[in-house]
Amino acid sequence: MTGGRFSKLLEPGHIGQVKTKNRMIKTASTLGYQYDEKDGHITPRQLSFSEAIARGGVGLFISEGGIFDWPLGAHDIFHYRIDDDEYIPGWAKMAEIVHKYGCPIFAQMVHSGPWHRKEMDGLDPVASTAGIRVEEGGRPSTTRALSIPEIKGIVLKYVLAAERYQKAGFDGVEINASGNHLLNSFLSRGFNKRHDAYGCDSLENRSRIVLDIIGEIKGRVGQDFPIGVLINGMEYGVDNGLTIEETQGLARIFQEAGADYMHIRVDGVGKYLSSHYPELIHYPEPPKPLGEMLDGSRHGAGGYVPVTAAIKKAVSIPVIAVGRLDPELGEKILQEGRADFIGFTKRMLADPELPNKVAAGRIEDIAPCTACECCISFRVYREPVRCRINAALGSEDGYVVKPAEKKKKVMVVGSGPAGLEAARVAASRGHEVILYEKEHQLGGLLPLACLVKGLEGEDLVAFVRYFETQMTKLGVKVKLGEEFTPSFIGEVKPDAVVLAIGGAPYIPEIPGINRPNVVSGPDLHRMLKTYLRFFGVKLLRELTRFWMPVGKKVAVIGGAIQGAELAEFLVKRGRKVTIIAWDEPIADGLPKRKQQRLVEWLGEKGVTIITKAKCEEITDKGLTISTQEGKRQTIKTDTIIPVLPFKSNTELFDTLKGKVPEIYLIGDGYEPRLILDAIADGWRIANAI
């Protein structure tokens, strides 16, 4: 234990009668590990994940819960269930596994309400009020209002679910009254338009359904079974939405009713949907004005803490702070008395061992969450959650790197994400690893990607720094500035070679592509790599605000993630940009919610986006294109930049086949994809050597 540096974070705590060994909480998140089964029972992948979290040393694990009002309470068909006793054994197995590591476990209870998908069963979603419209991924739905008898029936289902969790060995439950779910449709005047005992005419009436749930659960399972309440501390972009003064009043009401803790988010609707992921509010740039009581100084990290702190002043029960927090920021919040517990979700998806590493003083060994939003994107679009940096997420093998049966000499060529992960995992398994990188720094194209993406949100510099640390600690022999040649095979005599050499640049065959007003991808890469050696990412990003080797009007050829993010970078530096694409979705490759936000933002900034267009010729005047209908036009530009996905790069692999016992081609060299896929390649192959 590190003592001083994280003394508050590592301090034991209490929630009701439940003791926690530290102040770190894994907050609930839907992982989608039921998507393959569809029968409502706990899956082996869920148990494996739960064990990894508990083994990682967290003080309290709040698990995603099961649907207790089937099917109306479900978002879609891919959920765990708790609406019948037949599901208790699976939850009991989860509790048993978590308790094995001295970790208490709560279950979050949520009723989707307006978010129920009518197409799954033909039933209209329900809410406090008729006519609430929710859209997700272009899927609109409109609610019907619950009658008072129906409300009473749903309250009973909450109670029966809590009783089942208690029978399964859970230590408590959390009532999710946040987001745009059922209970919040009662709490918020932005949604509640009814005028009865559960209506909008008083705070007490709006809170009545939650009070009924708390009181009935306590009456059924006992006063010593903790109940937490998760609420929107305020609502963003919602007419008549919750204010801090109202949520302070709600928190006091819930405490008086018997709630054992408050868990605080900030949420909204429309473009601020799921703003409880604060980095999404700030992407591609924060709204102006940001909003009262929100802190934008860290690009979303800790942005909701002022709201949490205000609610903490209103109650004496513990309060949980969340919102892109890390151990350093969490410790600061606790030291300042602005919260009692710190909640992590995505950071613990990236590294379930985060609490143990904090306790051991190994902060540099925590795999960083870079806020890429891949995990959210998979979940929202009905796929099991994956993590960019943690390829083990979702596995059934306990998330443990297993020692190799036979120690081998492994040569890794290339230090992009695939190569770095392959080297890390192979060395962790006990192999002798040599890593070759022809550039003078690790990371492959990651430093260039960071230059474009920036450090404020998606920090790829931290990503590379983590791997640099692991290379040193694991004893990987790193050869920088040394381009691999086939002759090395005879000199080193490796047992296995992993080629992570990246993809081959794709240069479109357009007449005039070699003209001076064209900056090709390879040329741009070479230029920026040279600058990065001397200036570093942070300084070079600042310098590009004053000078870049591109004109004021720029045409970007390619509309996928590479072209769209370059367009964002250029717009923020005062360039007028036109994107020319063929059939690829604009910003394709970005996680879905980021993709949607970036496309909207580019439109707001006046970026011209031309799709279904073929590039015909490049002249001194600019770029001539033809539309799908055959119409030709010339886009007058100063600079043209082709930014297209790489091609597979198999030449070296073909040369070395048969010359080494084991050889693998991974990452973009095998198939150009995303960082997520490259890391997964490195993990998979290194575990197979």
Image: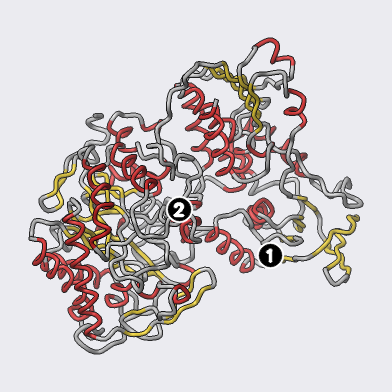
Q: Which mark is residue 151?
A: none
SS label for mark 2: loop
SS label for mark 1: loop
The x and y percentages for residue 615 are 84, 59
Left or right placement of residue 450 versus residue 549 in this view: left
Q: Residue furthest top?
A: 491
- Quadrant containing the C terminus is top right
Return the residue nearer the eye: 225 or 72: 72
Q: Which mark is residue 607?
A: 1
Q: Which residue is mark 2?
A: 299
User: Above or below — where is 495 with respect to 512?
Assistant: above
Left or right placement of residue 16 versus residue 231 in this view: left
Give the residue at x 60% y 44%: 541
Return the residue nearer the eye: 324 or 577: 324
Look at the image and tell me whether residue 493 can be seen.
Answer: yes
- Location of residue 624 by image quarter: bottom right
The x and y percentages for residue 348 are 37, 44
User: Above or below — where is 395 with respect to 281?
Assistant: above
Look at the image and tell me whether residue 233 can be seen.
Answer: no
Give the residue at x 36% y 48%: 46
Dot 2 crowding, Cα within 10 Å, few <14, some 14–19, many 20+: many
Q: Amino acid at mark 1?
A: Val
The x and y percentages for residue 522 are 76, 39
The x and y percentages for residue 449 are 61, 43
- Quadrant containing the N terminus is top left
Left or right placement of residue 448 versus residue 640 in this view: left
